[in-house]
Image (cartoon, helix red, strand yellow):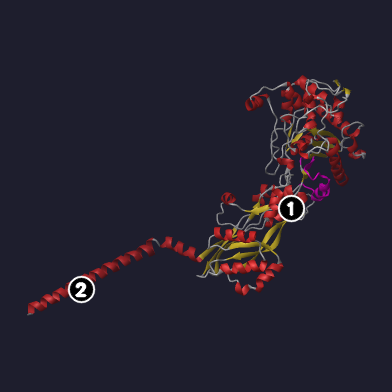
Amino acid sequence: MLDKKILQIQSISKRAFLIGAGKLSLLSLLGVRIFYLQLLKNNEYKTLSDKNRINFLLMQPFRGQIYDLAGAVIATNQACFRLFLDRKIGENYQEELQLINKILELSKEKIKYINKKIKITSKRQPVMILDQLDWQQISLIEEQKINLNSIFIEMGYSRFYPIAAPLCHIIGYMGQINEQEKQELNISNLNDFNIGKAGIEKYYEEKLRGVFGYKQVEVNAFGKQIREITNIAAENGNDLHLNIDAKLQEKIQPYLNKQGCSAIVMDSTNGNILIMSTSPTFEPNNFTKLSQNYWESLINNPYKPLINKAVQNNYPPGSVFKIITILAALENGITVDKTVHCTGESVLGSNSFRCWHKPGHGIVDMFSAIKYSCNTYMYELGRIIGCEKIIQMAERFGFGAKTGIDILGEASGFVPSKEWKQNKLKSKWTIGDTLNLSIGQGFLLATPIQLARFATAIASNGRLYLPRIAKSTPSYSQINIDQKYLDILKEGMFKAVNTMGGTAYYSRILAEKHQLAGKTGTAQVQSKVNENDDLSRESIAWEKRNHAVFLGFAPYKKPLYSIAVFVDHGGGGGRAAAPIASKIMAEILNKYV
């Protein structure tokens, strides 16, 4: 009997031991896990915990303002209202969005944009759903505030341009940052931020933008801010001062042909850009809240208003390039009294190589050739000196290379060569190519800013300036060319404007102290079908009409300003470009001289 009780007690003790051992093992495992989590993995889990309760907020800097030559503000920041959605606060935010749509009567396009933006933005981050709201819209939203728990309003800033369209291609515009730009700025969590997209706004983006600040705030389980942990203030962007006379640019804008035109005025004593105007224009203030309709109206406009034609377009320079041919000839032993008999007929058995003046100019010397813009004279110079000398002179004056102007998207123009034609077109250079080159036609291309710098180099006795829109220390390279050759050129350009029969005679400035010197140009965009074709007449299609060009400087006796005007498909340079240049130069001289 006793043995049975002892066996029973031993059995119970064994079970109790096993249960106790099991509990001890579980407690040991739990203790080890707690030790692992609290001591060994403390920092990692603390970081994860902080991420759940601490929000990191970027603080945008105040963008620098832009000023013109006179110190007038031409780009500034205006206070505006912005509407944000915080999805961490409530689950019924979709109903709140529908209420916002109803209050503000949003378009289907805008609703689609908001939904897309919400979809690509993290739920942990408030998303800006509307920008540029006015006071009336804010008042309507505030009336429904009790029903809008997830919606809140913040003050922000938007870019504003007081003189917008006349300066649009210089200043550019702002636009919302894209993914590539986020990577470049190393800011991955920034969605509702505008940066410079074109013009000065883009070129000087880093200087104007400033440095982001940030703050860390502790939030509760509902996403509400409890306290501020860290606050590093943003550093505002730097202001930018330009060489542009905004009031003058605004005044001369109506002078430009609305189908396509550019006008550049440089200070020939330092290379500063006083005016750089392009037509047609656009409204940069519309880009802060760009509508699809406005964008499509710009990109579908056949006259390309978004393109800064002064620096981004390549054109055949036409007869203004004859100045290069003259300089190359002078440097290679041809004198001013060299004469050629111009009959107006072709010099190569082809309609392509006639003088533009069908009756001919008769016997012309170098000054007469510049004054009348005689093709036949230039053909003869090209025959004598050959294409290499003309090409070398063109490259010395900066043709075929970017000027380095402080604006993005500059084209480089193009100066052809024998090697290029053989490699690219698999054909040899011909005498016809040389004749075309001598009058600025054929494969040759230039930009209006290159022509303006060329005119400045003549006016400044061979200084090839670095053109600057923003204020900076002047920079130039001195072209090694005999001063007497430049003086001959200047005299010829004076005669072209100020003596009867000159191609720009009817655009001269009468005041002696303001006299303008210059050279007209007419550049063909297509070949003549027959010798009687007039590709400058207004009756033919605009896109087939010749381009019109003028470059020059004033005052003649002491040059202070140089100018280049290019009228897209404007017809003749003397008829279309020279009058514009004369009016612009008169405005400048009346103000500053």
Local SS, label 1: loop
Q: In which quadrant will I find the N terminus?
A: bottom left
Which label lies toward us, 2 or 1? 1
Q: Return the x and y of residue 134 as percentages of the image width and height.
A: 70, 65
Q: In which quadrant will I find the C terminus?
A: top right
Q: Residues within 10 Å of mark 1 (few under 14, many from 20)?
A: many
Which of 69/553 is in front? 553
Indicate whether 593 appears above or below 536: below
Residue type (three-letter) at the residue carrying disc 1: Glu
Indicate whether 514 appears above or below 168: above
> 375 left or right of 45?
right
Indicate whether 400 appears above or below 16: above
Name the residue: 15% across, 74% down.
11
Which of 141/353 is in front? 353
Q: Earlier in the sequence, mark 2 or mark 1?
A: 2
Q: Return the x and y of residue 332 as percentages of the image width and height.
A: 77, 21
Residue 209 in view in this figure: no
Name the residue: 64% across, 61% down.
108
Span colored in magenta: 243-271
Q: Return the x and y of residue 119 as percentages of the image width and height.
A: 55, 59
Name the residue: 58% across, 69% down.
95
Residue 25 in view in this figure: yes
Which of 262/335 is in front? 262
**Residue designated by label 1:** 283
